[in-house]
C-alpha cells in the first residue's frame, strides 16, 4: 500500500474538529468559501501529491541538479510537475482575486501544501519560493514591478527566489556587502555575491526573479542600510528577454532537498546587472521579513510533513514486518508477531505520532492566527492574532525541525538494518529534515528571537494572550470530558513558563541581556513543549467531542487521546526541569573559554 | 590544520589520570608492559590513523563497494590499509604471545582502536571483525580449526565475519533457519541465507572465515538448537583453496560505513558448503556472545570515535569562522567574531564535549573491567569486574550511539549551511553514527537486556557494586577538592536509580514482566545518565588532582571541570524525572492498539 502522506481522516480532524477552519468562512474575506470549497482544493492537491509528486521523489533525490557550463539542469520531471502545481492555483491560493487568487485561508492552504511537501518537498519548494517572492512584489512593489515581474511569477511562467545570504555573512545580515548603485534610468546596478540560493537557477521556466538584499552606495552600515531589490535573471529589452548579468558561480552539494539546487550566484560581474528597488530604501530587511516570516512557517510545515511521511512509512512497516514474540512467549514454533506488538516499537511510533500530529496542530493554529491577523473584522482581534502569530512563529519553525529530526530518526530505527539503506525511504527523509534547523534562521537564532524579542514584546502581552488561549482550551477540554488533570497540567506548565519569563525579562532589563539569553535554547524547548501540550489538549477535547457524536471512529479518537496522554505525562514534566535550569543560570557554557575546549 | 581525531592530551588524561591504566601493569598478565610500551603502541596507531586511514576516509565513503558478477570489489585503498593495520599488531593486540599477541590490556587497545575508528571506521571494521572471529576460534575451536583457520586470520592473510542475521529473523535469533547437516567426514553441510554480513566479501585478501549460527538437522527449535560453525569462503582441498559454495546474493546500499560492504550471503546453494562446528553443539549462541559482547563494546567505541572526530571538526570550524557580533555590540563596522564567541555555539560545543569525553571515559572504564574480569589475581575481583562489565556493556554500547547521534547532529548544525553539504565532513559522520543504534542489538534490545537481565542479576549485585564504585569516585573527588555537592548529586542519582530498580524488579518477580519492562528505554536513558555522571565526577577529580601537580595545563583542566559541571547540573537532574516516569508506569504505549495509530 502506498504511503498515504497525510491521511484524510487526520486532515478532517485537524482542520474541522480541532482548529475549526470552516468557522473562518464567517469572515468577509472568506465569505465565498465553505467546507466544500476547502475540500475540493484539498482533494485536488492530495491527488497531485500522491499521483505525481510522490512517485517522482526518489528519482529527484537520486539525480540532483547538474551544474554544467554555467547553467543548472534540474531533474527533467520538474518540467511537468511545476505546471501541474501551478494549474492547481498553489501560487495564489491565499491571494485575492485581483491577482488571480482564490482567497483561501492560509490555514487551509498550509495543510494542502503540507501534503505536497510530504510527497516531494523540493518540487513544492519552487512554488513556496515563487509565491513568497511574488507576494513581496504584490505588497511593496509599484505598478510597473507588479506588471513586469509579479504577474509572470503568479502566472507560473517565471519563478522566484530570496537572495539574502552572502559567503562572508551567513546569518549576520548587517554584514551584507552586495551593493546597488542608482542610475538615472529607474534601475540600480547591482554587484555582489550570494550563496545558498535555493532554486537560484534551473531549466524549466524561462526566467527567475531574485529578491535581493543589497546596500545602496550611499547607505549607512549595518542592517539600516539594506534595501530590497528585484533582480531578474533575464531582463526585458526591446520586447525580448536578455541576460541580466546574473551568473551561477557554484552549486552546493546538499545532503537533502536534492530536487532543488542551492547555488552561489554572482550579480554584476560585467557591471550590467539591473535591479529594481522594492518598497522603501533602507527598509529592505523589514520588507523581507514578510517573506521570511511566511518562509519560517513554511519551513515548520516542511518539518511536519517530512516527519509525517516517515511516520506513516514506519507505521506501515511495523504493522507488517514479523519478528520476535511477545515477552514471555517462549515457544519458538509459534509464528512471529509484527513488530508493532513490541512495546518499545509502539513507544517509538507513539512518540512520532505525538510529534508529528502535535506539530501539525501547532502549524495550523499558527496559520489561523495569520489569517485572523489580516482578515479579522475587529482591529483588536487582528492585533491580538498578530501578537500570537509573532510569538508562535519561532516555535512553529523550530519544533518540527528539532523534534521532527528525532521523529525521522525513529522511523529509520523502526526499519532496523533496512532503514539504514537507500533501498528504503526513511533515510532520505532524515537527510531532508536536517536542513530545517539551519535555513531561514537557525535554531539558535530562533531561540534568541523568541526570548529576546517575541515573549517580551509589548510588556509581555503575547504570553498573556497565549495563557488565555490555553485557558480556553482547558475549558473546552473539561467540557468535553477530558481528564481534568490534563488541562490543569498544561495551564500549570504555562504559568511556570510565564513566571520564568518575568524573571528573565527582569534580568535583561536590569542590564544583563547575556544572562537573560544564556538559556534561550532551553527556553525554546520549554515553551515549545508547553505549546504542543496545548495543542494536544485541544486534540483531546476534539476527540472527546467527536467520540460523543461520531459513530465508528472510536479507534481514531482513542489514538488521539492516547497520544495526548503521552505528551502530557511524558513530555510536559520536562517543563519544570527546564524552568529550573533556565532560572539557575547554570553558567558552564558562559564561562567556557575557547582555549579550554 | 588537520583534524587531530583524538588529541594526545586527552588520551593521556583519560588513560593515565582518569582510568589509571598504568596500574594494570602490576598484574602478572601485563607485567611486561609499562606506560612506555603503551605509549609506543598508541603513537604507532595514531600515526597510521592520521597519515593513512583518515586521508582515505572520504574517498571510501564516496566510492563504496561494487557488486559485479557475484563478486565484491571494495575501495582499492583497502589493499594497502589492511596490511598496514595488521603490521601494527592490531589483530592480536590483547591476545597472548602463544597466538602471536602482545598481551596489551584491552583498556589500551580500545583507545588505540578508537583513534583508528575516528579516522576511518570502515577500514578498522575489517580488523575488528577478524579479531573477534579469530578470538572465537581461539576460545572454542579445536587444534585443527586453530591451525587451519585462526592462524591465517590472526596473521592477516584472511579476514573474518559474524553471520547471525537472516532475512526472516533480524533480531530474533531463535528463528535462525540456516541448517547444518552432519557428515561422516568431520564437517557439516550448511544451507541457508544470511543478511547484513559486514565484510562478507571483498577482494583484498584471499579468504574469509564466516562465523555462522545454524541449526543442526536434529536440533530442537528456538535458541537452544543453534550451533556455531566456521565456514570459510574457500576451503582447502589437496593443498589448494577451492570455492566453498558461499555466494554473495546481494549488497545492501548502506547510508554510512560505506567502506565496508553489508551483504546478503547464500550458503550451500549447490549443497557443497562445508562448515566446521565450533565448540559445543547447541551452545552456539552462548559461544557467539563472546564475540557479541566484544562487538558491543567495539560499537560503543565506534560511537564515541565518530562523535569525537565530528566534535573536533566543529570546534575548529567554530574557532575560525567569523560571523556576527556579541550581544549588544551594535556597531556594524567592527569586525565579526568567530562563532565560538556566541554562547549558543559554545553550548553546542560543550554538549558535544560532555557526550564524547564522557562516553570515552565510560568505554575505557568498561574496558578496564574487561581486563580485570580475566586477569585480576583474585577470583573475587575477577567476579566483581565481570559483573560490572556485564552491567555496563549495554550502556557502553547504547549511550554513544544515541547521544553520539545527537552530538553528530550538533556538529552539522555548527557548520550551518556548509554542514548540510558533502563539501564538509560532518554529514558523513552523522550518517555513519546512525548505524550504531541498530547493529549488534538495537537500542530497544539493549534496554530490555539492561533492565530485564543485567541489573537484576544475582539479586541486584551489579548495582551494589556500581554504587560502591561511585562512592569511591565521590571520595576521590572530595579529596581532590571538587565541589562536594557534585559527588553528592551523582550518588543521589545512583540511589534513586537503585530504589527504582528494586521497585521494578519487585513487579517483575510479582509476575508482571511487561509492566516491569515497559519503560526500559527510559531506564536505559536514566542509568546511562547516572553512569556518565560518575565518569564526569572521575574526570573532575583527575582534573583537580592534575591542576594541583601539573604546570601549564590549567586551560585543559578548566575545560574538564566546566564539562563536568555541565553534565552534573544540566543532565543529571533528568534522572529524577525519568525515575518518576518509570515509576508512574505511564501506560500510553502499553494501551495503544495498532488500529488506533
Image (cartoon, coloured by chain):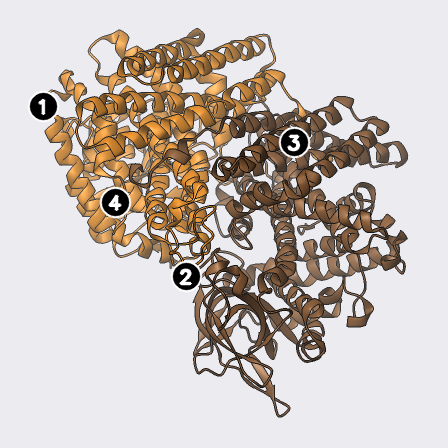
Chain colours: A brown, B orange
Please report, as a chain letter, where disc 3 is located. A
Mark 4 surroundings within 10 Å by alpha-carbon count, few (fewer than 14), some (14 through 19), many (20 or more): some
**In x, y percent, where is residue B108?**
21, 29
Chain holding disc 1: B
Residue A498 numbered mark, or none: 3
C-alpha span from label 1 to label 4: 30 Å
Separation of marks 3 and 2 at Cα, in angstroms: 38 Å
Residue drawn where x is 20% and y is 50% of the image: B51
Q: Nearer the viewer, mark 3 or mark 2?
A: 3
In the picture, which quadrant includes the C terminus of chain A?
A: top left
**Tag shown at residue A234:** none
Determine the image quadrant of residue B424: bottom left
Marks 1 & 4, CB-CB < 8 Å contact? no
**Nearer-the-camera pick, B388 or B526:** B526
Locate residue A39, reporting x and y percent: 83, 55
> How far apart are labels 3 and 1 at the CA level?
64 Å
Disc marking residue A168: 2
In this picture, residue A124 sits left or right of residue B151: right
> Which SS class for mark 4?
loop
* Image location of residue B425, percent across then percent down: 37, 52
How many angstroms separate mark 4 from mark 2 (CA)? 26 Å
Q: Nearer the viewer, mark 3 or mark 1?
A: 3
Q: Are marks 4 and 2 on the same chain?
A: no
Residue extending farthest to the front is A510
Q: Nearer the viewer, mark 4 or mark 2?
A: 2
Is B412 left or right of B71, judged from the image as shown?
Answer: right
Give the labeled residue for mark 1: B32
Amino acid at each position: 500500500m502506498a504511503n498515504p502522506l497525510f491521511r484524510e481522516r487526520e486532515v478532517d480532524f485537524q482542520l474541522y474538529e480541532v482548529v475549526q477552519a470552516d468557522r473562518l468562512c464567517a469572515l468577509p474575506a472568506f465569505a465565498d468559501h465553505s467546507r466544500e470549497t476547502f475540500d475540493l482544493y484539498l482533494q485536488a492537491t492530495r491527488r497531485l501529491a500522491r499521483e505525481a509528486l510522490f512517485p517522482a521523489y526518489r528519482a529527484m533525490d537520486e539525480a540532483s541538479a547538474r551544474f554544467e557550463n554555467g547553467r543548472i539542469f534540474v531533474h527533467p520531471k520538474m518540467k511537468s510537475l511545476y505546471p501541474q502545481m501551478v494549474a492547481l492555483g498553489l501560487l495564489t491560493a491565499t491571494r485575492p482575486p485581483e491577482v488571480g487568487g482564490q482567497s483561501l485561508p492560509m490555514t487551509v492552504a498550509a495543510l494542502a501544501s503540507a501534503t505536497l511537501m510530504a510527497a516531494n518537498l523540493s518540487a513544492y519548494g519552487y512554488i513556496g519560493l515563487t509565491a513568497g517572492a511574488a507576494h513581496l512584489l504584490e505588497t511593496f512593489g509599484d505598478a510597473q514591478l507588479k506588471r513586469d515581474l509579479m504577474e509572470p511569477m503568479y502566472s507560473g511562467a517565471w519563478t522566484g527566489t530570496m537572495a539574502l545570504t552572502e559567503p562572508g555573512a551567513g546569518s549576520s545580515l548587517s554584514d551584507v556587502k552586495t551593493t546597488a548603485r542608482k542610475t538615472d534610468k529607474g534601475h540600480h546596478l547591482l554587484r555582489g555575491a550570494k550563496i545558498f540560493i535555493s532554486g537560484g537557477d534551473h531549466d524549466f521556466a524561462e526566467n527567475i526573479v531574485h529578491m535581493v538584499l543589497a546596500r545602496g552606495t550611499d547607505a549607512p552600515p549595518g542592517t539600516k542600510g539594506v534595501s530590497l531589490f528585484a533582480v531578474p535573471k533575464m531582463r526585458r529589452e526591446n520586447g525580448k528577454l536578455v541576460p541580466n548579468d546574473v551568473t551561477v558561480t557554484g552549486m552546493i552539494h546538499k545532503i537533502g532537498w536534492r530536487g532543488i539546487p542551492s547555488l552561489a550566484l554572482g550579480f554584476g560581474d560585467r557591471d550590467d546587472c539591473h535591479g529594481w528597488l522594492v518598497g522603501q530604501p533602507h527598509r529592505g530587511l523589514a520588507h523581507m521579513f514578510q517573506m521570511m516570516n511566511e518562509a519560517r512557517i513554511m519551513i515548520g510545515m516542511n518539518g511536519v510533513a517530512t516527519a509525517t511521511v516517515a511516520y506513516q512509512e514506519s507505521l506501515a512497516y511495523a504493522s507488517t514486518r514479523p519478528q520476535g514474540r511477545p515477552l514471555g512467549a517462549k515457544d519458538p514454533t509459534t509464528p512471529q508477531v509484527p513488530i508493532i506488538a513490541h512495546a518499545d516499537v509502539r513507544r517509538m511510533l507513539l512518540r512520532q505520532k505525538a510529534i508529528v500530529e502535535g506539530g501539525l496542530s501547532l502549524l495550523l493554529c499558527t496559520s489561523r492566527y495569520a489569517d485572523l491577523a489580516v482578515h479579522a473584522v475587529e482591529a483588536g482581534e487582528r492585533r491580538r492574532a498578530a501578537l500570537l502569530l509573532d510569538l508562535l512563529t519561532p516555535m512553529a519553525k523550530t519544533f518540527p525541525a528539532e523534534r521532527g529530526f528525532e521523529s525521522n530518526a525513529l522511523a529509520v530505527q523502526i526499519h532496523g538494518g533496512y532503514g539504514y539503506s537507500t533501498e528504503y525511504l526513511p533515510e532520505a527523509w532524515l537527510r531532508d529534515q536536517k536542513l530545517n534547523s539551519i535555513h531561514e534562521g537557525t535554531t539558535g537564532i530562533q531561540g534568541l528571537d523568541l526570548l529576546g524579542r517575541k515573549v517580551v514584546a509589548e510588556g509581555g502581552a503575547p504570553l498573556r494572550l497565549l495563557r488565555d488561549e490555553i485557558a480556553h482550551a482547558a475549558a473546552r477540554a473539561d467540557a468535553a470530558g477530558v481528564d481534568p488533570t490534563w488541562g490543569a497540567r498544561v495551564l500549570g506548565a504555562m504559568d511556570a513558563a510565564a513566571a520564568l519569563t518575568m524573571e528573565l525579562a527582569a534580568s535583561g532589563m536590569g542590564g544583563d541581556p547575556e544572562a537573560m539569553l544564556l538559556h534561550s535554547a532551553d527556553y525554546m524547548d520549554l515553551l515549545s513543549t508547553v505549546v504542543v501540550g496545548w495543542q494536544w489538549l485541544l486534540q483531546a477535547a476534539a476527540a472527546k467531542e467527536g467520540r460523543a457524536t461520531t459513530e465508528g471512529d472510536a479507534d481514531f479518537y482513542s489514538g488521539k487521546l492516547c497520544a495526548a496522554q503521552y505528551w502530557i505525562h511524558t513530555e510536559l514534566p520536562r517543563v519544570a526541569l527546564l524552568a529550573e535550569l533556565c532560572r539557575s543560570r547554570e553558567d558552564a557554557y558562559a564561562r567556557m573559554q575557547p582555549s579550554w575546549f
